[in-house]
Amino acid sequence: MRMYQHRGAVGRGLAIPLVVGERIAARLTIALAIFLVAIVFLNISALAADAAMAPQGVKSEKGVTAWLIEDHTVPIITIKFVFGGGTTQDPVGKEGLAKMMADLLDEGAGDLDSDAFQIKLDEAGAEIGFGAKRDGIYGSMRMLSGGNQAAFDLLRLAVNSPRFDQEPVDRVRAQFLSGIIASQRDPNTIADHVWQSMIYGAHPYSRPGGGTKSSIAGITPGDLKAFHKANFARYGLQIGVVGDIDAKSLREKLDLLFGDLPQNQVLTPVADVAPKLDREVLYVADLPQTSLRLAFPGIAFSEPEYYPALLMNNILGGAPFTSHLWEEVRDKRGLSYDVDSDLKHNQHSNALVVTTSTRADRAVETLDVIRQTISELAEKGPTEAEVEASKKYLIGVYALKELDSSSSLAAALVEMQAEKLGIDYIQRRPALIEQVTLDQVKAVAKKLLSGHPAILAVGRPMKGLCR
């Protein structure tokens, strides 16, 4: 969603800043209204746990499908959706195309130019947003449910008929270039590019999703239109809807929003890739702290060992305050304020990644402690008590963090479809975790953690930082 503050100082006349202020005030009023309605009416914990809120599949006459959770206690509708593809579809030399296109989808559509579209959006009392990640183009809309036809019409235009006029294209391009120039002075951003190249090699995941100065400068409205045409289609589209709308009404809206899109996307195939491990890189930067990243093999949602791996990761570094890494690195030695591990999931690659930052003069010690802690878990595994405690934590935290609002619920519905987890996954997930045994967790710890990881250190030169 664009920031109007950039417009008042670009020589469009003295009246423009006042109009911009009115639009900002309108946006704030809309957001506040939605927020207050949610606070007054929404019992979050009941929404997450209530069996009556189980998702239902909805299919329109034109074959567009969505998963819906009806909640008529709150006069709000939240829609989230994703088109498969994402930044991996950027042509070589046009890196940043997917992200730039996503940022321009609400900058004019149909017969509405950028200003007219935003005025109509304010009048409709809705919030629309788009973004691009590695494996998809994401969209969302949130609105009050009463009198929402105007909001649906605007989303339809943005999805089906974006304009990509030269003025907003040039303005968004300037914003991208400004961000790229600023990031060139940020050691951690540079190191992130080093990290992606280090573990993914020549795979599209290693390319800068936000583009480079030369790639962004070369993107034309024609490129944006061609990318939109190739990527926006009904096949490869996942939709999650939560709120004050029934299945019959949603069927009609699905065809309105997506029914006129082509049936199939035209995507460049992307190969699966295993992260390149057993390598170490020190990116030298004069920083007071050294940041550390370690990558181990990951595991996909679809693999039988996923839930044992989920528990193992939680014990290693996923749970704050109680994990092995937290205890050894922070509590016992005070080497870092925060240390964690995470199972990273992408469509074409997975990894278990450990991250932390520490004082430059204690970086070697911190890395040694992390290695030793991981090695011990790989060799000995966790205790039965740790596994049981992690089961309770992972079952409880899912409702609190992943299902705590209509927005997060809609996002979960989209992810469940993308990962083919099944429409009853929310109900089945506790049992999938409960059935994991201690021996399964020990086995997956040995499998994933026994090898040499990829390690990136960002900070001052220090002898012995990497083996």
Image: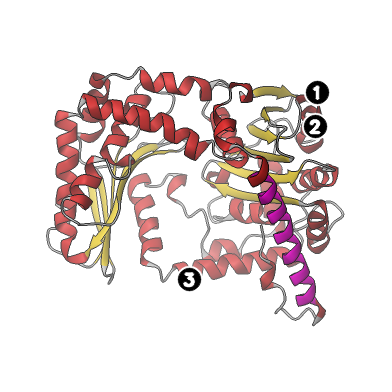
Left-right relation of 23 to 362: right
Give yes or no for contact between labels 2 and 1 (Cβ–Cβ under 8 Å): yes
Proximity of marks 1 and 3: CB atoms separated by less than 8 Å: no
Distance, label 3 to label 2, CA atoms, is 42 Å
Q: Is 338 located above or below residue 63 in the figure? A: below
Q: Position of residue 99 (x, y in %)?
A: 59, 53
N-term mark: 1 or 3 = 1
Task: Quickly name the residue at label 1.
Answer: 61
Question: Is residue 191 at least partly visible in the picture?
Answer: yes
**Magenta region's main secondary structure?**
helix
Whole-number angstrom distance, CA of label 1 to CA of label 3: 48 Å
Q: Amino acid at mark 3?
A: Ala
Q: Residue at x 65, y 64 (%)?
A: 172
Task: Please state the extent of the stretch shown in magenta in the rendering.
Answer: 16-38
Q: Secondary structure at mark 3?
A: helix
Disc 2: which residue? 255
Give the mark nearer the N terminus: 3 vs 2. 3
Observer-nearest of 341 and 186? 341
List the residue tagged with mark 3: 182
- Residue lying at the far right in this picture: please name it: 111
